[in-house]
Amino acid sequence: MKDKPIYVTEPFLPPLDEFTIYLKQIWKNKTLTNGGLFHQQLEKALCEYLGVEHISLFNNGTVGLITALQALKIKGEVITTPYSFVATAHSLLWNGIEPVFVDIDPSTLNLDPSKIEAAITSKTTAIMPVHCYGHPCDVEAIQEIADRHNLKVIYDAAHAFGVQCDCGSVLKHGDLSVLSFHATKVFNTFEGGAIVCPNAETKRLIDRLKNFGFVDEVTVNVAGINGKMSEVNAAFGLVQLNHIDAALEGRKTADTLYRALLKDVMGIRFLEGSGERVANYSYFPIMVESSYPLTRDELYHRLKQSNIFARRYFYPLISEFPVYKKFPSASPGMLPVATKASQEVLCLPLYSSLPEVEQLRIVSLIKNI
Ligand SMILES: *Cc1c(COP(=O)(O)O)cnc(C)c1O
């Protein structure tokens, strides 16, 4: 008999009876969406938990990214990373913007600030970096470049829930940061997302954009979208927020165990932890280097045969998909670090309820090749 399948992640589900209480309330109030009570409560609770001033909830992170670009009226070219989930670049195409891919830093796998300036042209209007796997970007270096060239910065912070940097929440950097609350993320609302806004005025603008552009009952000035989060999703977020610290603690335990067990395995390298204070342990990527007996893909298939479903995040690179290949910046020759990382990376299962015995099984499969 095969072992029970282990996926790269398992959603974090708080106690069902706590959620039921909220559902009964929704049935009673009969407010299902359009900025109801739970929507308002979740925005407030997330501001407090994350240590930010203003948040606008969304129905998913991708619509959040698209709307963030709209809110800042970004056009022309935007510098971004090829080493991310495809939605990062899709949000640019949906706004008629040309993505300009810039290579990543080999130690963090985030956009390499030292390579940004060479990619700036007269059409560049913004930079869209990603805090990959929840490791903070070099936010100071990126801001300095943006200031020098008068560019906006929109962070795809889909992996960065709860991540801290030296000056508090990493989500306070740049002009806007966009979170995803998809089921596979550290904090989820089934589907969902949010934009972290620097001030009340920007939040008001974004709140309108996600509600078709309505200013009041009879006034629409822009072609907004429907990006609203429903009351059911917001209620689930409130319940989950009560348990998020325990979930993060469970992830941390699993992360620590992997690091200890895989420390001296020849050909397996893992990214440096970003430290106690800052991390959210959202992924556990390993780099399968040439000194390992198998290639990354061979290891991926070997694990799969044992019902372990590790994932190759991020392979292929965004720049390798047919819709992006045609852009001059997508040439692999210009993206050597991202190309290599994409060929070596394997994200191991990591979630709060991952049993220790399963982690031991995964590690012994990796070790006993
Ligand atoms: C998950 C993810 C998104 C998309 O978020 P959705 O909520 O699924 O739309 C965008 N960017 C990155 C880096 C992601 O991991």
Image: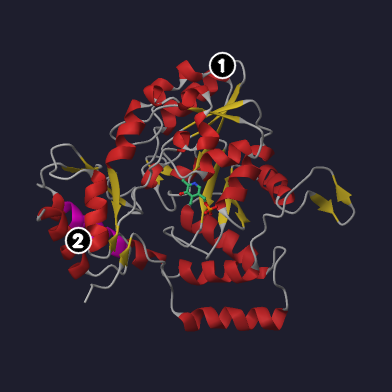
Residue 212 in picture, x, y percent from top left: 77, 51
The span from disc 1 to disc 2 (Cα, nearest Å) is: 47 Å
Local packing at callout 1 (Cα closer than 10 Å; few below 14, some 14-19, many 20+) is few
The earlier-in-sequence mark between 1 and 2 is 1
Q: Mark 1: which amino acid?
A: Thr
Residue 336 in picture, x, y percent from top left: 33, 26
Residue 342 in picture, x, y percent from top left: 34, 39
Rendered image: mark on residue 137: none
Check residue 255 for magenta coloring. yes
| Residue under label 2 | 362
| Residue under label 1 | 121
In the rendered structure, the answer to whether residue 3 lies left or right of residue 104 reads left
Contact flag, marks 1 and 2 (Cβ < 8 Å): no
Residue 50 in picture, x, y percent from top left: 47, 54
Magenta residue span: 249-259
Check residue 34 for magenta coloring. no
Task: Choose top left, top right, bottom left or bottom right for residue 3.
Answer: bottom left
Q: Quarter holding the N terminus?
A: bottom left
Local packing at callout 2 (Cα closer than 10 Å; few below 14, some 14-19, many 20+) is many
- Tag nearer the camera, 1 or 2: 2
Q: Is residue 26 above or below residue 273?
A: below
Residue that extends furthest to the right in the rendered view of this protein: 218
Residue drawn where x is 10% and y is 43% of the image: 266
